Amino acid sequence: MPDLIFIGMVFETTIIIIAAFILGLILMKYFQKKHQFTLYLFLIFLFYMIAIIFSWLSKVLVLYSGVEYIYNTTLADPGTIQSWFVLRITDFRFSFFFLTIAIFISYVLKVNVFEKGYNRVHKIIVIIYGIITLTFSLLVYERGNTLLDAFAFLLIFLFMAMIYVPFFISSYKSFKLAEGKTFKNAFISLALMSIFYILVPFNFLIDRLLILFGGPGFSPFYFLAWIFVLLGMIASYFGYIRPKTSE
């Protein structure tokens, strides 16, 4: 198991470095043109990267912190403020938290790009569901309870679907109606981003279910999840941000 954790840490280090480079390029494009949609995409990707950083930090803590109650699950939770944060980091709850924020900003982007304004009922539903997901991520926690972790992934997956399925539909419709290569590339890149980000919690959920049924964790689905985050960044940068801001 330590070998798998180390492999996961190295893999996520690579993902973080590439993501940070893409974020730097996006920020440069934003400062050049001050385009509001570019800022939204930057914030979305920033929170995705923070989620990856906390996932990476969980592995660093397990491998190198020397805090015995982290890797020895037979020891009781000390019940300190430090252990509250440490255990939620090592069990990916902070990663869930920041993923949820990224999804909400994606909703804001969708409304601004494709709609004339917020649908009041839908906005209330999104906000309430987002608050429930954020609360569950940090507060509904029991050490070693994989079922609760799987339910947290399910909440995030449903939130992703709630936002990104309509996002995909709107992007694809705009792609079909758009004239000119630049606009077609922009909308199809947003459609691809939506698909990639729906696949993130889906793959995490499968990995967590495999653990629930006796698997060791860090299945191929775990690594696929973070790869899809990176693919979403790359698709939107080369298809939407770079061409749009270079006009």
Image (cartoon, rainbow, N blue to C red):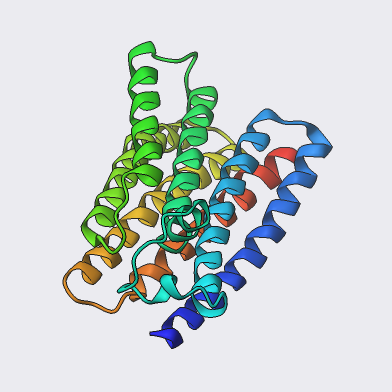
- Vertical relation: 231 (above or below) 68: above
- Vertical relation: 236 (above or below) 37: below
Position of residue 22 in the picture relative to residue 118 (left or right): right
Residue at screen point 45% across, 15% down: 118
Q: Residue furthest bottom?
A: 3
Most foreground residue, 220 or 67: 67
- Vertical relation: 6 (above or below) 88: below
Position of residue 123 in the picture relative to residue 67 (left or right): left
Residue at screen point 74% across, 52% down: 25
Q: Residue furthest left?
A: 213
The image position of residue 236, as x and y in percent, is: 57, 48
The image position of residue 92, as x and y in percent, is: 43, 58
The image position of residue 246, as x and y in percent, is: 77, 42
Most foreground residue, 53 or 190: 53
Q: Where is the C terminus found, in terms of image quarters?
A: top right
Residue at screen point 46% across, 31% down: 107
Q: Where is the N terminus found, in terms of image quarters?
A: bottom left
Q: Quadrant of residue 34?
A: top right
Residue at screen point 16% across, 71% down: 213
